[in-house]
Image (cartoon, rainbow, N blue to C red):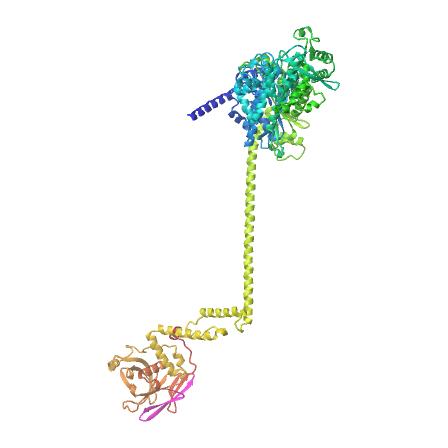
Amino acid sequence: SYLPIVVASDGVRAMMESALTARDRVGVQDFVLLENFTSEAAFIENLRKRFKENLIYTYIGSVLVSVNPYKDLEIYTKNHMERYRGVNFYEVSPHIYAVADNSYRSMRTERKDQCILISGESGAGKTEASKKILQYYAFTCPASEQVQTIKDRLLQSNPVLEAFGNAKTLRNDNSSRFGKYMDIQFDFKGAPVGGHIINYLLEKSRVVHQNHGERNFHIFYQLIEGGEEDLLRALGLERNPQQYQYLVKGNCPKVSSINDRSDWKMVRKALTVIGFNEDEVEELLNIIASVLHLGNVQYGGEEGNVCITSDTQIKYLARLLGVNGAVLTEALTHKKIIAKGEELMSPLNLEQASSARDALSKAVYGRTFTWLVNKINASLTYTDDSHKNYSVIGLLDIYGFEVFQHNSFEQFCINYCNEKLQQLFIELTLKSEQEEYEAEGITWEPEKFKGIISILDEECLRPGDASDLTFLEKLEDTVGGHAHFVTHKLADAKTRKVMGRDEFRLLHYAGEVNYNVNGFLDKNNDLLFRNLKEVMCMSENKILNQCFDREELSDKKRPETAATQFKASLAKLMEILMSKEPSYIRCIKPNDSKQAGRFDEVLIRHQVKYLGLMENLRVRRAGFAYRRRYEVFLQRYKSLCPDTWPNWQGKLADGVATLVKHLGYKPEEYKLGRSKIFIRFPKTLFATEEALETRKHSLATKLQAGWRGYSQKSKYQKLRTSAIAIQAWWRGILARRRAQRRRQAADTIRRFIKGFIYRHRERCPENEYFLDYVRYSFLMKLHRNLPKNVLDKSWPTPPAALAEASEHLRKLCMQNMVWSYCKKISPEWKHQMEQKMIASELFKDKKDNYPQSVPKLFVSTRLNGEDINPKVVQALGSEKMKYAVPVTKYDRKGYKARPRQLLLTANSAVIIEETKLKQRIDYGALKGISVSSLSDGLFVLHVSSDDNKQKGDVVLQSDHVIETLTKIAICSDKINSININQGSITFTVGQGKEGIIDFTPGSELLVAKAKNGHLSVVSLLNLPHSQSDGFSKLKAEM
Ligand SMILES: Nc1ncnc2c1ncn2[C@@H]1O[C@H](COP(=O)(O)OP(=O)(O)O)[C@@H](O)[C@H]1O
Ligand SMILES: [Mg+2]
């Protein structure tokens, strides 16, 4: 399918390319590298070797020498264009693309307009070269959509101009018969955005006459061969060039290398691309056809009464040219003369009539050609003139040096032009070595042409019967002495043989040329009879209307002669070229027969000679291959030396000197001029270029790094400022909050102060907050500080407003605590408390040692089973013992102290001595119990005297007197029978006798019988305060 074919053809191409690179090494690519650079033979041998290998391009330094291969080489593909794009001159094999690319890059980097001068004789390949360059730019330059149209138009202008301006000559089947300088305009991005063409002197005589073996301009044949039937019919044309007088002179209607029919199609398409509409194409073709019809206008009749024999031509002409047939007929046969202010129509003779007709044909065709160029220019105009800032590459493809059997005015002009260009080449390339150039024997004599042209003009303007021959005589008279000028008359015998009497010979830089003076004056005058002009001015054809301006008719001044006009336009061209940086392509024609592979050494040696290629080479080798203005050189290479990078501050010359020193240039390799540096060897420059290439990469890396650093830094700065902004903002918020809090605090304080001041008033806005707060805080404080137990009497001071509520709360709280205390209380503890309550009722504030008893818990008994003798227990029998305590008994008489045990049962209190129940006191018999108010432990059990068994009251002493008495009171249910006595107790001893116990406070406990027979008890004052576990436990629990 499709793909493999592509791959295959790519593979083939790749193979061919590698083969090509191998063959590139044939000979030397640059003549500068020739071993024997002064030898012409070596030069030509190198050309030949390369030509045989189809290597048609070779450099002399930066000048490209191109040999026409006369066959299609596979070296103009898109791949090739790509390969040369942006690559240095010397890195790839020589190619026209390298020149094109080099100019393009110079234009872009140095911002200087460029021009590429293509020279060489007719058929050497100039036009092809210019087309290749154009194609290269069209392909490689950046393009937008708009630019694409311009590119297309630039490319398509070629076939159109070639159709109208090229013809087959003996030298070239597609010879340019006009000069062309084309500006390609590039915008700042390097895209082609416009163009402008200047055309030079079209060889108009070809319209009416061609030498044998040559043709008229291509367009005529293209129209007749390719034009559609309808079109030809409308134009009144037949598909046969032999029918037209203007096409038969050279007797060469068909050329094998030209396909008129396909060219026609191309031209028609190109016209559309350039922007011709159908009407314009029609009018253009009407003009072309009318030229053919004009050629067929035949004159007859007698001398002095010339008439046109065929009406058909006139009919067609009238229609095609848009003029009145009768008026045209008259203009073609008469001449208008103004004599004494009167217009007269004077009839023409046959010769005059046909030359008037031919003059009209030439004028119509020539002016139409100029119109065509203008039209193309309009379509190439750079429309975006907002910034008229564009750079230009100019392409000069002008007719090459020409020598025919018969050379006329046209050849004279063409060769004059070539001489001028050669002069320019010398001036621009070899000027600084002018002396050396002269030493080579090449001399330049620009004066000779000027002389000839001015004499020609003189003869044209001179009144009287000036003719071509009088012109020749004048030449002999004036420039006859010049070494490069010869006529038949002036020549030696040998030369005379090859010269006609109507010829003059010029020795051009490219060789000798004999010019035949016939027609010089007419062609120089280039006159068109006034009445023919008038007819054309009336034409309805819009193109002709623009070509023939009525103002021309009223202009009395003589128009400038053709040669002078040409000279002036060339002078302008030289100015244009001088203002630009030139590149050169020197085209060489390998043979005269347009054959591929034929290397005609004689012909080539001749061209090498007259093109000055050997001198060119010698100058390159001897002198300095490369020169550049200091600023340009420094600007380009300054990055290669640290002292000049990035900018050199001092004088330019010093900067360059520093730079080349750093680069290691040897003294013989370069010279510093007044404003330029001269470098002798290409290799020196190449090495520098290479260094620059490498440096560019590292610079790019550095720049990137720098940029990255910069962007990181700015990123960081941005972050930093953002952070600061946020911080400031946040601090602001905090400060505002703080301020607000202070304000609130101040407000609160103020409100408090006010509230405090108004605290005793009725509730009002000034104090309500304060009051509420005080209440609230009191309640909160209370909440936190509620009393822990019933003994804790602390209570926060309430505000006045809450005094009542506080009291309620306090009571509630106490009740609650009491209630919960009671709920928690155990039966034993309850019992204990009941006893303590009774003790409190009995003794509180009544007996001195009561307080000491409070913390001491009452126990159920002070004596356990082991402490009481079993006999006693036995004696008690079923009687249950409730409490037992050791006591001291004082005898009723003598008050002797005896240790006893006191046992309480349900019915009685029993006093025990060891094993004996000494005394049983039934509770019924217990009348009362007495005790002192002091701190002693003595007490008296009053026993009823009715009981015989009773021996009287019992005086006892207990260490736990409060407990013991409380127990007795409870057991005997005699709570109300306890007497607390001050001072003394009286008791019964038995049989009605009484004893008395006296109590006195003292420093020492003492119980003894006093002298008065009373029992004296001294009780301790200020009993030491003792705390027991029981007391603290009690406290903790309450
Ligand atoms: N580079 C080339 N490759 C192939 N053929 C070429 C090349 N240059 C020129 N020719 C052939 O030579 C002919 C004449 O070239 P042209 O450029 O018209 O010459 P000039 O403009 O110098 O008179 C072309 O028509 C073409 O056939
Ligand atoms: Mg040409």
Rendering quarter of residue 420 = top right
Left or right side of 906 for 369:
right
Q: Quadrant of the C terminus?
A: bottom left
The residue at the far front in this view is: 326
In the depicted view, which residue is nearer to us: 444 or 519? 519
Magenta-span inclusion, residue 602? no
Where 482 falls versus 979 (above or below)? above
| Residue 678 in view (yes/no) | yes
Q: Main secondary structure of the magenta part?
A: strand
| Residue 164 rendering spot, x and y as whole percentages | 59, 20
| Residue 568 rendering spot, x and y as whole percentages | 68, 22
Magenta-span inclusion, residue 997? yes
Where 1025 falls versus 946 (above or below)? above
The residue at the far bottom in this view is: 992
In the depicted view, which residue is nearer to us: 249 or 749? 249
Where 720 falls versus 1027 (above or below)? above
User: Magenta region: which residues?
Assistant: 980-1002
Q: Quadrant of the N terminus?
A: top left
Left or right side of 765 for 328:
right
In the depicted view, which residue is nearer to us: 118 or 1009? 118
| Residue 974 rendering spot, x and y as whole percentages | 33, 85
Left or right side of 497 for 737:
left
Rendering quarter of residue 712 = top right
Q: Quadrant for ligand 1?
A: top right
Please name the residue shown 54% across and 40% down the image. 708
